[in-house]
Amino acid sequence: MSKTIIVSNRLPIRIEKEDGKNLYKTSEGGLATGLGSIYKDGDNIWVGWPGISLPEEEEKEVEGELIQRNMRPVFLSEAEVQEFYLGFSNQTLWPAFHYFIHHMRFKDEEWKAYTDANQKFADAVSKWLEPDDVVWIHDYQLMLVPNMLRQKFPNITIGFFQHIPFPSYEVFRMIPWRRKLLNGVLGADYIGFHTYDDMRHFLSSCHRLAGYSYNRNQILVKNRLVEVDSLPMGIDYDKYAQSAKSELAKAKEMAFRNSLGSQDLILSMDRLDYSKGIPGRLKAFDRFLDENPEYIGKVSLFLIVVPSRDRVPSYKALKEKVEFLVGHINGKYATINYVPIRFYYRSYPLDELSAFYRMCRIAMITPKRDGMNLVCKEYIASRENQDGVLILSEMAGAAKELSDAILVNPNDEAEMVESIKRALEMPIKEQQRRMQIMQQTVSKYTIFQWVDLFIGNLRGLKARQEAMATK
Ligand code: F6P
């Protein structure tokens, strides 16, 4: 019986230490939900990092516990976390792929750590791999793993999905190890991106940097047919819709409302990341209040920032910048009973998120660049009464599907300011018309369809490769 092996940097669980004990916290993330039905089934497994560096003597016990849950841990030392994860993955690839070229750095020792860590993941997979298995590798931290496995097992079925943007050739070519990265990914049979543009950029880099010619979305890599595709990832729509309708979410909304008063709320929710455009959004809100003083006291920004990668200097600096701007804007417009920006630096459980999604009539999601962005889809799914307005950056992958949002260029401050006014003044009929269309889109193409489509296409391609080989 063939099995499916999911591989990603993080496992769908993270270990946290409390009073010297290891606590296993399951991830609520979209990918973990979508792949839950796969890796928990039969002999299938998920290979990845449990998110903590543990003393060696604890690794055996943790491994045993995770094996029970169909997971196979890849333990990373503190040095590996520093150089592979915080270093090359998040200070070379992440900024390059999000077009923050001034944040990227090129360090030979971090490239070596990235290569070694990718080998470690490939070795962990090899240990469990059998010839008919399907391996599905996720994201930019593991771009070399497909080819490492291909070298060892020439005939296995490998899929790769990139969850962040793939940059234009002009940016990608700046990376010293660009060809190695491309050849690493090309070890896969089927390669997925969220958008057609990401896919196009990848194909162009394969051609211009590594000399591969391609026909539509197909590349021949040493006589092996590789296909590249765009498959926008969805959410578990029913989970968000049901949670927003629940009595618990409604009760929480009521309790929050009682403390907040009746002002209009604009939701801003992201991980702490410079790619999310948080300072730009704050500046636009400042200018909006400045240019539209009649709204002072009537509208607040509900700003949730989820802590992330806070050991990377650019993230630390961003946190300080956000705190400065929030202080500055609140100092400027606050009154005894009005707080312009309500700022929360933490993560929230689903029932509270649902209450926030219900309570904010506008969501402003304006990343400078984002592979997809699932928060905007969660917001849409949570709008039980089909009202509310989404202001969405053109630079988010989700904008390709959600043309009924107010689409903005996050670098155009005047347009961002105007979009806030437009959202606040949008007639209810127009809100409902747009929201209904967006709900149809998001409910139709969920995370479960995405998973089925990817696996189905990967298996279909493998069958075509085999038919080609026997001709
Ligand atoms: O968007 C890419 C991604 O890797 C997501 O899969 C993940 O939720 C997020 O970035 C944060 O990643 P991490 O905390 O693992 O660095």
Image (tube, rainbow, N blue to C red):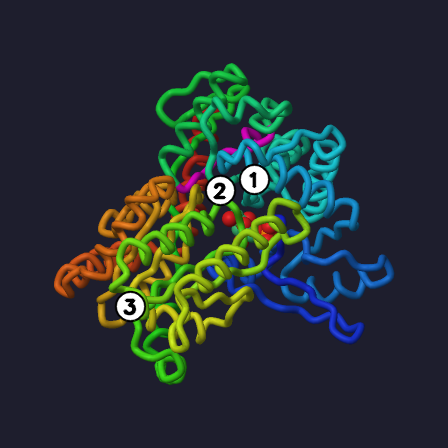
Quarter of the image with the C terminus in it: top left
First in sequence, mark 2 or 1: give its number. Answer: 1
Q: Position of residue 104 (x, y in %)?
A: 60, 33
Q: Secondary structure at mark 1?
A: helix
**Residue on which disc 2 sits:** 164
Q: Quadrant of residue 119?
A: top right
Q: Earlier in the sequence, mark 1 or mark 3?
A: 1
Q: Quick check: 294 left or right of 323?
A: left
Q: Provide the secondary structure element on which disc 3 rests.
A: loop
Whether residue 165 is situated above or below residue 16 in the rendered picture:
above
Name which quarter of the figure residue 58 lies in.
bottom right
Q: Badge 3 local density, few (<14 within 10 Å), some, or many (20+)?
A: many
Which label lies toward us, 2 or 1? 1
Residue 186 part of the magenta-drawn span: yes
- Locate residue 323 relative to residue 366 in the image: left or right: right
**How far is disc 2 from disc 3 in space, using C-alphas?**
27 Å
Crowd class of label 1 (few under 14; some 14 to 19; many from 20; radius 10 Å): many
Instruction: State the CA–CA distance, disc 1 to disc 3.
Output: 32 Å
Cβ–Cβ under 8 Å for marks 2 and 1? yes
Amino acid of disc 3: Arg
| Percent coordinates x, y for residue 367 in the rendering | 42, 47
Amino acid carrying mark 1 in the image = Trp
Q: Which residue is mark 3?
A: 383
How many residues crowd mark 2 within 10 Å: few (<14), some (14–19), many (20+)? many
Q: Which residue is mark 1?
A: 94
Please provide percent x and percent y for residue 152: 68, 32
Instruction: Please give the name of the residue rendered at 43% of the width and 70% of the height, measured from the top-left corner.
Output: 353
Check whether the beta carbons of the residues at disc 1 and disc 3 lie within 8 A of each other: no
Q: Which residues are magenta?
A: 184-194
Find out if the beta carbon at label 2 lies less than 8 Å from the nearest ligand 1 atom. Answer: yes
In the image, what residue occupies the spot 50% across and 72% down? 349
